[in-house]
Image (cartoon, rainbow, N blue to C red):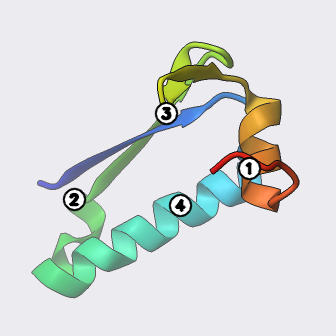
Amino acid sequence: MPLITVKVIEGVFGDDQKAQIVERLTDAMVSIEGENMRPLTLVIIEEVKSGDWGIGGKPRTAAEVRALAAGTTDES
């Protein structure tokens, strides 16, 4: 029984995006293990409080990550 755990910063992904994460990761696992494993594939999305996640040696907030994803910051 596959278990996929995804950690994201709280407030970065909306409900629709999280549903897509669950669907696509399940699809990826099923493509490897076979369709019979779909009902047994578990995906858990854990949200980490904004500011409690470090990227590049710095704590990051949801707003900073959204800016990075949008390419509206000079940091990489």
Rendered residue at 28%/64% (across/down): 39
Residue at 11% in and 54% down: 1
Mark 1 burial class by Cα count in 10 Å: few <14, some 14-19, many 20+: some
Disc on res. 21: 4
Q: Are marks 4 and 3 in contact (CB under 8 Å)?
A: no
Give the amino acid at mark 1.
Answer: Leu
The residue depicted at 88 percent of the width and 54 percent of the height is 72
Q: Earlier in the sequence, mark 1 or mark 3?
A: 3
How far is disc 4 from disc 3 in space, using C-alphas? 24 Å
Residue type indicated by callout 2: Leu
Local secondary structure at mark 1: helix
Q: How far from the left and from the top, in percent, is residue 14?
A: 77, 47
N-terminal label among 4 and 2: 4
What's the mark number on residue 68? 1
Badge 3: residue crowd in 10 Å (few <14, some 14–19, many ≥20): few
At label 4, counting other C-alpha atoms closer than 10 Å, the crowd grade (few under 14, some 14-19, many 20 or more) is some
Q: Is residue 58 above or below residue 64?
A: above
Q: Nearer the viewer, mark 4 or mark 2?
A: 4
Q: Nearer the viewer, mark 2 or mark 3?
A: 3
In the picture of the structure, the residue carrying the numbered disc 3 is 56
Q: Earlier in the sequence, mark 4 or mark 3?
A: 4
Q: Quadrant of residue 44?
A: top left
